[in-house]
Amino acid sequence: MKWYQTNKPAVLLIPALLFLLMIVYSLVMAFAESIRSPEGWTWQYYADLFRQSQLIESLGYSLLITVVSVFFSVLIGWGVVRWFSSFIDEPAGKWLVWIPMLFPHFVWGYFILLLLGQSGLVSSFLYQAGWLSSREAFPVFTQDPYGIGIIITYLWKEIPFVILMLLPAYLQLPKQYGEVISVLGGGRKEWFKTVEWPWVQPVIVEITLILTAFIFTAYEVPALLGISYPQMTAVLAYEWFYGAAWEERSYAFGLLCIIAFILGAIALLSFTLMNRRRWLLSKSSHQY
């Protein structure tokens, strides 16, 4: 028991270390598979990857959907928290916001398909009401070339997540700084510039990174609501992995390694910069 009390912090870290070890092991094995061929080790698969127009279009398609989904999720979620944080902090407000988070992404994707598909509930209602000449006249919102159905699904799911992450930051805003700014003759612009934005910026950066990594590598919703060409990167990697050609499996591992490296580098750089900003904010808050 004495040993446990002495080493309690290290013991509590064991699950996290095991989880981290599994991730590192997976990345190492994926990288090894991406450079292994029947003739031995080779970088040829990586050289071939970027000569494939299918991959370039898939990356562009994934990037477009990811940027639009993340931008509007953060923007709308941030706006909701800014103007309705006091209501959301109440039990009724929390339940209203959290309900979409109770269901998996795939369920919401299927719901969007039933709701906004050309044979879905909305098109059927409009057709029965006489506002559409046929169900096919309803705009294509699902399985469309622009990923509108995918974006709507992610907005529906990620806006509550943004609210969940930003709400504690707004509830802990140092309100006393507002009085100081008011005494010095400042207004809402100075409050936002000197207090609100520096306070919430690290959280917004973290949210952006999490959502970018999740959406860019997501499989379920793009597989359900996407089109056959171009595909999002995770869907393309899945098809390569389970394809009949053996070399395509190495392409799948190579693609996932490239994405993991890029996202990891961006996350490491961002957390390094944001941790320093958090430390400065914490220090200035204590001094005040």
Image (tube, rainbow, N blue to C red):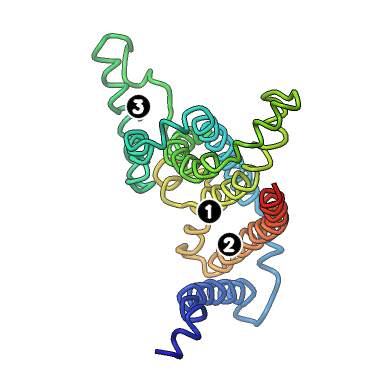
Q: Residue 198: image x %, image y %?
A: 69, 42
Residue 256 numbered mark, or none: 2
Residue 168, relative to residue 78: is it above or below?
below
Q: Does residue 223 show up? A: yes
- Residue extending farthest to the left is 128
Q: Are marks 2 and 1 in contact (CB under 8 Å)?
A: yes
**SS of the residue at dot 1?**
loop
Instruction: Identify which amino acid the numbered label 1 is placed on.
Output: Thr
Counting labels gives 3
Q: Quadrant of residue 143?
A: top left
Q: Residue 248: image x %, image y %?
A: 55, 64
Reading the image, the residue beneath label 3 is 118
Residue 103, relative to residue 11: is it above or below?
above
In this rendering, the label closer to the viewer, 3 or 2: 2
- Residue extending farthest to the right is 184
Instruction: Identify which amino acid the numbered label 2 is placed on.
Output: Leu
What residue is at 68 percent from the left and 37 percent from the top? Answer: 195
**Quarter that holds the N terminus:** bottom left
Is residue 129 found left or right of 170 in the rendered image? left
Reading the image, the residue beneath label 1 is 217
Instruction: Identify which amino acid the numbered label 3 is placed on.
Output: Gln
Q: Nearer the viewer, residue 164 or 26?
A: 164
In this rendering, the label closer to the viewer, 1 or 3: 1
Q: First in sequence: mark 2 or mark 1?
A: 1
Is residue 99 found left or right of 264 in the rendered image? left
**SS of the residue at dot 3?**
loop
Task: Give the class, few, some or many, for how many residues have Cα within 10 Å of label 2's Cα (few <14, many ≥20).
Answer: some
Q: First in sequence: mark 1 or mark 3?
A: 3
How far apart are the two marked residues, 2 and 1, measured between alpha carbons? 9 Å
Q: Nearer the viewer, residue 247 or 143?
A: 143
Q: Nearer the viewer, residue 202 or 285?
A: 285
Q: Does residue 50 show up? A: no
